[in-house]
Image: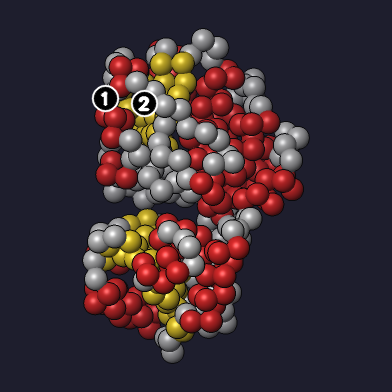
Amino acid sequence: MIDEILEQIRHFDTIIIHRHVRPDPDALGSQGGMACLIRDNFPGKQVFIVGEEVDDLRFLLPMDEIADTLYQGALVIVCDTANRERVSDERYSSGARIIKIDHHPLVDSYGEPQWVEPEASSTSEMITSIYRNHPEFVLTEQAARLLFAGIVGDTGRFQFSNVTKETFLAAAELVKQPFDRQKFFDTLYERKLDLVRLNGYVLQHFTLTGEGLGFIKLSQDLIHSFNLQSSDASALVNCFANTKGLKAWVLFSEEEGLIRARIRSKGPVINQLAANYHGGGHSLASGATVYSWEEADRLIADLEALCRQTA
């Protein structure tokens, strides 16, 4: 599969790389890391990365602003995006060919070829394997930093159950490059004072049920009272994850016209439940969307039932 993707890269002069909306470190790390690998090893290619900017992750890499005409005859690579509806920048479908590289369970087949490995910790780990399979390639500090960011982000600093031997081998290859890891970690986990204060509110007010379900509901008015936007609250999804007796948890943050649900688990499989609520994801980390607090309560009840079934 890697060689097939590289053959397509050799064939096209213009390559545009996308990822999912509301990007996390793996989305940006795999997108940027792939761009670096192509630029550094295929001289003469035009390589662009597109999508919306996110303030907290802007330090990883800036996005390109490109004209629609660049898609004519271009190869489009979509990283870390399970389904087409979540691709950032709808122009992705305007290219001559699409390649999908992703580690989420396969729910939407698009792209030719599509390289999907749900057993991989992250799409960044998959991109790193391109270099590991082609040691003659150049791996720059910037590429290593971005791919390391993606692996760290999707493994929770190597704490989650998705970490395998291959994850550590990939990370070991990346840290051979002399990027400043301390500065990277300091910047990645730095929080605005307002977000720290909201973190305190969540810790004081989340609910832990007798079945081992934790949840917190953050209304739009509450979030705004901390001078924050609803998207900022997503960073707090794991702030009470170490609570004794917790099996699964959900953080609700209200936006205009909808409520985002970030769902995590230490055992109960949650991605099918998330799919029932306009979402999806991994077995232990998923997202969903509800459209009223009453629907949020139904999700809580269903999630509590899953916890009840898990010893």
Residue 207 screen position, x and y as percent: 45, 83
Q: Residue at x 43, y 86 (%)?
A: 209
Q: Nearer the viewer, residue 27 or 52?
A: 52
Q: Position of residue 55 (x, y in %)?
A: 51, 46
Q: Find numbered disc 2 in the image and state the secondary structure of the residue it sits on.
A: strand
Under tag 1, what secondary structure? Answer: helix
> Eyeballing the image, is 116 above or below 268?
above
Q: CA distance from mark 1 to mark 2?
A: 9 Å
Mark 1: which amino acid? Answer: Ser
Residue picked out by circle 2: 76
Residue found at x 63% / y 55%: 190
Q: Which mark is residue 56?
A: none
Q: Are marks 1 and 2 in contact (CB under 8 Å)?
A: yes
Q: Which residue is mark 1?
A: 94
Q: Where's residue 110, x and y in %?
A: 28, 36
Q: Is residue 37 left or right of residue 54?
A: right
Amino acid type shown at disc 2: Val
Q: Residues within 10 Å of mark 1 (few under 14, many from 20)?
A: some
Q: Residues within 10 Å of mark 2 (few under 14, many from 20)?
A: many
Residue 227 image position (x, y, % from top left): 48, 63
State how many labels appear: 2
- The residue closer to the viewer here, 38 or 221, is 221
Furthest residue to the bottom? 210
Report the quarter where the C terminus lies.
bottom left
Which residue: 45% across, 24% down?
48
Instruction: Of the two numbered discs 1 and 2 on the same chain, state the one appearing first in sequence.
Output: 2
Q: Quadrant of the N terminus?
A: top left
Occupied quadrant, residue 73: top left
